[in-house]
Image: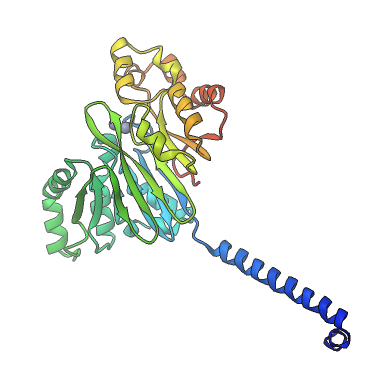
Amino acid sequence: MTIQACRRTPPARRVCRAFAVVLLISTIHWAALAQNKAAPQTQIVLLGTGTPLPDPERSGPCTAIVVNGTPYLVDVGTGVVRRAAAARNKGIKALEPTNLKIAFITHLHSDHTLGLADVMLTPWIMGRHEPLEVYGPAGTPAMADHLVKAYETDIKARTEGLEHSNTTGFRTNVHEIKPGTIYKDANVKVTAFPVSHGQLEAFGYRFETPDRTIVISGDTTPSPALLENCRGCDVLIHEVYTAASFDLVSPEWQEYRRTYHTSSKELADLATKAKPGLLILYHRANPGCDQARTDECRQAGSEEQLLKEMREAYKGKVVAGHDLDVY
Ligand SMILES: [Zn+2]
Ligand SMILES: [Zn+2]
């Protein structure tokens, strides 16, 4: 219909007006869709899914939440900066090592913190000027101070020698945390909640970003606080061990597992209540079997066994996380 035809009679004018309204609504709709497409997308990059076991395929625990080009690390296990560089090489530009500026530590077990010196020093040597912001339990400030002291020869050589490294980027600003909202910026709100991990002070973290809510367990037995923080969350990243391997270890190791970690059955029960959109299994621990090193024990703690046990007991979407997986 032409503009002249639209003007000719009242019914034609009504049809044209209706047509114009439909056109306007659809234009607004598509503009909204286009804007939505450009909206920030949160990526979860599994930098390390391992445990203390020196498994070449699984670095020490470290998860990167990437929002609008900013990476937020949870835990800093062995190999963290090299895994970040590997993720960068796979196309996650935000994980350029000099861009690692903030880390949240769940607890001070060595498998979760062996990479702290790495993430303090390596990005600095590569040119980072900003001190590393670190959030963690009591004891974290002392750990960071001791690491600066431990590396004083290196720091002195690099700042006073021909490397001409800057005098700020190796430093840390450490924030000792308590449960509650511990961090907020334009990308994320981070809530720490207490979890139960033997005698250690330990936290889980809930990340709220513009498009996702992500909960990370750290190391813990089944935690009521985690359940409350995850109800209806988009992604739950949780530690776990297999029931089959539990049956093979000594009563002492069984007692240890009950006091520090979560079995497949316990996690299935918890996730059934929490209903995450996706459950990612990480930190597949096998204490007792790791020390026994028998084939039977290894098999009983394998990823295949874990997925079998989880799928028998849990009907939601569940995957086993691998280093450098992106969700
Ligand atoms: Zn651990
Ligand atoms: Zn631990």
Q: Is residue 144 left or right of residue 270?
A: left
Q: Residue at x 20, y 54 (%)?
A: 172
Q: Residue at x 37, y 31 (%)?
A: 224
Q: Quadrant of residue 38?
A: bottom right
Q: Is residue 79 left or right of residue 279?
A: left
Residue 163: x %, y % from top left: 20, 63
Residue 61: x %, y % from top left: 35, 38
**How does the figure colour the protein chain or chains?**
rainbow
Q: Residue at x 39, y 52 (%)?
A: 85
When the figure is inspected, residue 27 is found, relative to residue 109, above or below; the finding is below
Residue in front for this viewpoint, 103 or 85 = 103
Ligand 2's quadrant: top left
Residue 303: x %, y % from top left: 48, 27
In the rendered image, the quadrant that contains the N terminus is bottom right
Residue in front for this viewpoint, 316 or 20 = 20
Does residue 138 show up? yes
When the figure is inspected, residue 213 is found, relative to residue 204, above or below; the finding is below
Residue 144: x %, y % from top left: 17, 47
Q: Residue furthest front?
A: 10
Q: Quadrant of residue 160?
A: bottom left
Q: Quadrant of residue 185?
A: bottom left
Residue in front for this viewpoint, 319 or 274 = 274
Does residue 49 show up? no
Residue in front for this viewpoint, 81 or 285 = 285
Q: Is residue 317 left or right of residue 147?
A: right
